[in-house]
Image (cartoon, grey):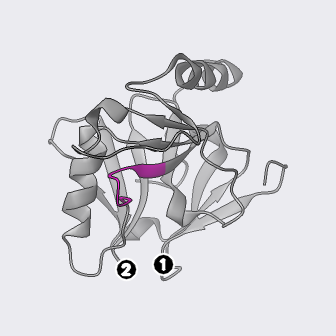
Amino acid sequence: MLNDKNILASCRCGKVVLEVACAPILRGICYCSSCQAAGHRHQERPGADSVLAEDGGTDYVLYRKDRVRCVQGAELFEERRLKPASPTRRMYARCCGTAMFLDFTKGHWLTIYRGRLPADMPPAIMRMMTAERPEGVILPDDMTNYPGHSGKFLLKLLGAWIAMGFKRPAVDGVP
């Protein structure tokens, strides 16, 4: 999976397809209250896919925005924000109620829901924002559990941004 081949991230019915042309920046599991709130709102919709694990985490894979493009179904995207002025939007495929990705519009990376990607993705390397996990959830020690955003996470994002020449592009083909 960490080669130069492009991979596809598609909705459940296949009408919306993203093409990704690089290895991920990282794969992690987020427990922030915003991801949990958005996940619960999404999963309450009839026919929606599941984005939250039983422990409240959301499994994501982060990519450079300049390496992702929508190759099919851009007109089927539905944008949702927790608050109207939020810089974070989550994009869903209206055709089948599939959560596709999270876009921090001020950032240089795109956060794709793990379930949209091929099965042979590299494993998650960290859990983030674990201080906000649901009460009573005990996390295993199979990877590092960070209470907030870790230095490792921020350094990986910074490295990708440097490689992009400090640009913050829009995702090609995404409204």
Q: Closer to the camera, 117 or 172?
A: 117
Residue 95 placement, left or right of 160:
left
Residue 162 in picture, x, y percent from top left:
66, 18
Q: Closer to the camera, 100 or 33?
A: 33
Q: Can you identify the residue that label 1 sits on?
A: 12
Q: Residue at x 21, y 43 (%)?
A: 135
Residue 89 placement, left or right of 146:
left
Please state which amino acid type lies under the numbered disc 1.
Arg
Q: Residue at x 57, y 40 (%)?
A: 65
Q: Is residue 76 visible?
A: yes
Residue 175 in picture, x, y percent from top left:
40, 53
Residue 38 magenta: no
Q: Can you identify the residue that label 2 sits on?
A: 96
Query: Dot 1, how many residues are within 10 Å of its Cα: few (below 14), some (14-19), or many (20+)?
Result: some
Mark 2: which secondary structure?
Answer: loop
Residue 147 in picture, x, y percent from top left:
38, 26
Q: In this picture, which residue range is highlighted in magenta? A: 52-59
Please state which amino acid type lies under the numbered disc 2.
Cys
Q: Residue at x 36, y 63 (%)?
A: 92
Mark 1: which secondary structure?
Answer: loop
Residue 41 placement, left or right of 142:
left
Query: Dot 2, how many residues are within 10 Å of its Cα: few (below 14), some (14-19), or many (20+)?
Result: some
Q: Quadrant of residue 79?
A: bottom left
Q: Quadrant of the N terminus?
A: bottom right
- Labelled pair 2, 1 in contact (Cβ < 8 Å): yes
